[in-house]
Image: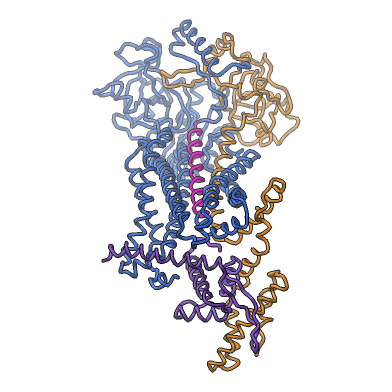
Chain colours: A purple, B orange, C blue
Amino acid sequence: MAMSYIGWHILDRELKKGSAELLILSLVEDRPRHGYEIGQLIELRSRGVLHFNVGSLYPLLYRLEKRGWIRGRWVENPGQRRRRYYRLTAAGEKVLTAQRSNWRDFVRAITRVTGVAHA
Amino acid sequence: MPDFKDKIRIRFADLKLSLARENEIIEELSQHLKDQYEQLIARGATEDEAHQAVLLELNESDLLGPELRRIERRLQHEPLVMGADGKAHLLGDLWQDLRYGLRTLLKNPGFTTVAVIALALGIGANSAIFSVVNTVLLRPLPYKKPERLVMVWEDNSKQGFPRDTPSPANVMDWRDQNHVFESMAALVESSFNLTGAGDPERIDGQRVSASLFSLLGVEPQFGRGFRAEEDQPGGNHVVILSHGLWQRRFGSDPGIIGKPINLNGESFTVVAVMPRTFQG
Amino acid sequence: MKPGVTLAQAQAEMTTIATRLQQQYPQTNTSVGAVVTPLHAHVVGDIKPALLVLLGAVAFVLLIACANVANLLLARAAVRQKEIALRLALGAGRARLIRQFLTESVLLAAFGGGIGLLLSVVGLSVLRRFIPPNISQAQAITIDAKVLIFTVLVSLVTGLIFGLAPATQAANFNLNDTLKESGRDSAAGSRGNRIRGLLVISEVAVSFILLIGAGLLINSFLRLRNVDPGFRAERVLTMKIVLPEVRYADKEQRGVFYRELIRRVETLPGLISAAVATNLPLTESGNSVGVSIEGRADPAPDRVPIVITRIVSPRYFETMGIPLLKGRAFTEEDKTESPAVVVVSETTARSFWPGEDALGKHIKIGPSNSDNRWLRVVGVVKDVRQFELVVEPKPQMYLPFTQANFFEPRALVVKTNLEPLSLAATVRKTVWEIDKDQPVSDIASMETIVSESVARQRFSMLLLGIFAGLALVLAAVGIYGVMSYSVAQRTREIGIRMALGAQRTDVLKLTIGQGLKLVLTGVVIGLAAAFVLTRVMSSLLFGISATDPITFITISLVLVSVAVLASYIPALRATRVDPMFALRYQ
């Protein structure tokens, strides 16, 4: 992931991408899903705020796959088209867990600080 | 059901992916578009509307090519750079480092531009000032043994002239009594009215003792230097021209030696012309 | 000098000889010494201190640029942690990684150096015009092999300097931390923040020093331009006319030429008055003589009062706009055979006859028992800065050209109604009408002469000003970058604060406060450093001290406002963080 910190719009995009990465990881946590399904779910769960078109979703998936956090596999179900399903790998699971606990710590810390400041 | 594969393939034309990988990606993406198409139809869109909407989505994805290029390229090349420690491959490694570095820089044009501009300004300013310092302060004077050349002045600080032109008598005494100088030459800045062909002109010059040129280690371009007897008062009015004056005023006349010129209303004989590089 | 003789030995020898000569010839050689200076120093002249200050200044500019690039690299290193983690995990050695990072930064520096070299070529062609004309070799300044090597070395060292911090930081981070975390809030990140803070502080401190230097020079230059030279340079045309002794052997002939020249020139249209004089102010050293004062014993030879002497024709003061304070100026009636008169400057009057009226007093050139005539003071004029604008006026006097027989007028000055140079050709033609073989040289307006006399000061002011401006821009960009990055890092925190009720102003205060803290620290450090460093340039200053409080305060204000502006824009962005977006982060 490359980021120049010069422009806010770039930052904004990167942040969105970062949060989307985590969204994707949590979406494939319980069961494997294919790309179209993941796209639909992101849109649904972000209540329409985050929309990923083909051009941004698949590069993200390939990136996560390249990092070894998810793995895709072609699955042919009877009566359906061949689809590529992505599942969470062990490394991806670690990243997801760490990120979640980190997030909880962060929220707690901020609440403690701002709770005093804005009580 | 429209087929989107060709539309996708066009976008990958210059990515140079392996055929298998390209087919795989194309298949996956076209599946996605088909899903979208079907969903739109299911929601009541006409086939035409659905087709247009899906194509629009694909056309919006102008980042698709570049993004994929970044991800897929890295997959192909990065392993080459990694883990290759060992002195045997030092040069090869360096080459790889350079290529990898160049790619990283090109991938972040914003960062690279800002950094290069900042550095260019900083380094440029240093080069410019250094070239002034180099020429003015560091470059040795174009004379023989420049580090052993010194100026000797009369010090009349009490009267406000710490570096005064010495009186001829003092120069003689200095020259005869010292043990530290190899030789000593005297010069006085002066200027002369040059008349003759063309407009009369005031030119800067120096009255010098005969030993000056041998002391500086410079030879005239042609002609001869001053002779010792010409140092005596009432010597025979001889003059050496600078290269610039010879070119400008005398049209680079090669036969100038021996000709008279008029300075301050008196006739002087030209005995030499200095080389272009000599700047009094 | 003979081989192996040092400058100090040569000076010692010459001092011995000069002392011996003093004892031998007390009349002529009392307090006459001998100085030995390297020929090179003579050729280089007094530009050396200015050049050294400038060399320091550009080094500072480069330091700031380095800090900026190091900042950018740090920000990128934080982002690239995952890439690094991956490569470490795949077995790349840390040394290998550091080398990769350094290769990248040296590559950057190489690009910078290449473009910088182009910039310096362009810059030099501009610079050449501002190098004071009395610096020899100024036109010979070129980019030679030495400059090229210098540029390559500077680029290389630069690349290593600004690349080292991010490279070691990137290679030292904890593999496990980064694999677990997103990399944005890791310990390495906060260490990066500390380094970034330090970089901002040093950028501010260094640009502060440069700005102070430039501020002092600009201030000096303004003062210099405001110095009253003692004459009015507007619409005065000057030229040099030196009569050769061979053709104008006696004083009478020369007098005829000058009188005829002035008469003809004054009838030309557009010309108000004309005069001749020995030396013009601010051109060359000119003549000085020792004088004795009537009614006082002659002082010891080394205490004889020295007076700058100008030989002038009647309407010189009028033409040059030198105010007459008392008495009268010279007239046509001051003929060779009339009583000898002199006009003195106010400093002469004050130092020769303190508390007395100078008019009617007498002075003589040379010792009081010499054959020279006593000169009666008939007028007092304002002091003129004869040598340099920066030098306080010394005692000076004026003699009528009809009565002085040791120095000859060499300059013609003309007061005009029109743009002075437009009349140059006409005046020159008039000279040639009288004598077709008489050269006319150094045609210039008096205003040009004044402006050229401060060329050296203008040169250093201009360059240091440009470099300080450059430093300010680079520092502002650096602050902006660091603040943007820090705001981006704290998006979640800011979003949560705002969700919990913080107002936009609170957020603004928070972020600007953070930037301001760094900037103020930098200013304080810069202040202390500038206090010490500006002393080296006191020889370049005029009329103000190297620690001029007004300059220091103004520059502090300028720098702080620029810095606040540079952190205000990212701060404003921070207030636009949508709380919902920040909270939805995961």
From this viewpoint, which residue is outermost toward the top? C24
Give left or right: position of C84 versus B278: left
Q: Is residue C380 above or below residue C565?
A: above
Between residues B256 and A92, which one lies in front from this camera angle? A92
Q: Residue at x 51, y 65 (%)?
A: A95
- Foreground residue among B59 and C306: B59
- The image position of residue C412, as x and y in percent, is 47, 34
Q: Indicate the quadrant where residue C585 lies.
A: bottom left
- Residue at 44% in and 56% down: C482
Quarter-of-image position of residue B232: top right
State the image quarter where residue C534 is shown: top left
Residues C489 and C232: in front is C489
Instruction: Tell me residue C421's x, y (percent).
Output: 50, 44
Question: Residue C361 placed where, x, y %?
Answer: 29, 20
Look at the image and give the residue range highlighted in magenta: C46-73
Is residue B60 a member of the stretch shown in magenta?
A: no
Q: Nearer the viewer, residue A59 or C461?
A: A59
Q: Is residue C103 visible?
A: no
The quarter in which the C terminus of chain B is drawn is top right
Residue C173 lies left or right of residue B4; in this view the side is: left
Is the residue A107 above or below the residue C280 in the image? below
